[in-house]
Amino acid sequence: MREKIFADVMDKAFDRERNTFVQSYGSRDLDASLLLIPQLGFLPPEDPRVHGTVAAIERELMQDGFVCRYPSRPGADGLPPGEGVFLACSFWMANTLARIGRRDDAVALFERLLELRNDLGLLSEEYDPVAKRLLGNFPQAFSHTAIINTAAHLGELETASASRGNDD
C-alpha cells in the first residue's frame, strides 16, 4: 500500500515543470507542509525534488524571511487575504534547511525566530512582519513544539559535526 500511495503522490502531486511538490492533486499552489517531506521520510533530504520544493517555497511563500502557510488570496480558504507568516512553518523551514545541508541558513532562521518570542519566551501562531507583532492563537503549542524539534535537530547536527571533528 505504501508503494501505491508513494507512486500516486509522485504522479499527481509533483509539478515537473517547476520541480516542486504542490498543495494538492491538480493544484499549482504550494503549502508549507511540503517542508515535512524529508522530516517524515517520504523522500531523503538529498533528493533533488526536496531541494526544488524548498527553493519554490522560498520563492513563493517567504515573506520577510519567514514562511507563509500557503498563498493568501480571496477565496482560497474562506479567510481574508493577508494573514501573518506561520511560525511553525518557519521552524519547519529551518529544520529542512539543516537537513538539506544548509546549516548556516537554518541557524540564522532559527535565531531570527527565537527573537520573536515575548518577554516570557512565548510565541503565537503567526507573526506580522510588517507591524512586527505576534498574531493569532497565543500561546501556540505548534510553534513551541516546532522550536523544540528544530533545536533538537540542530543540536544533533552540532553533536555529529563535533564528533567527526574529534575523529580526525
Image (cartoon, grey):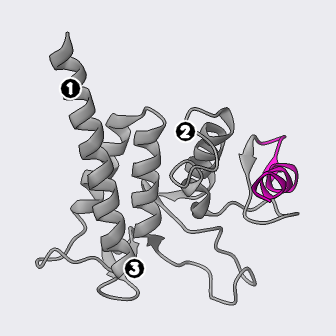
Q: Tag 2: residue type?
A: Pro
Q: Main secondary structure of the magenta part?
A: helix
Q: Is residue 130 above or below residue 77?
A: above
- The CA span between labels 2 and 1 is 21 Å
12 in magenta = yes
Whether residue 132 is visible, yes or no, is no
Q: Counting residues from the N terminus, which is met first, the one under dot 2 or under dot 1?
A: 2
Q: Is residue 45 above or below residue 30?
A: above
115 in magenta = no
Q: Counting residues from the N terminus, which is met first, the one under dot 3 or under dot 1?
A: 3
- The CA span between labels 3 and 1 is 36 Å
Q: List x then y, in percent, for residue 88.
A: 42, 68
Q: Which residues are magenta?
A: 1-18
Looking at the rendered structure, which numbered label has been put on residue 163?
Answer: 1
Density class for disc 3 (Cα within 10 Å; few <14, some 14-19, many ≥20) is many
Q: To which residue does mark 2 refer?
A: 45
- The CA span between labels 2 and 3 is 26 Å
Q: Tag 3: residue type?
A: Glu
Q: Counting residues from the N terminus, which is met first, the one under dot 2 or under dot 3?
A: 2
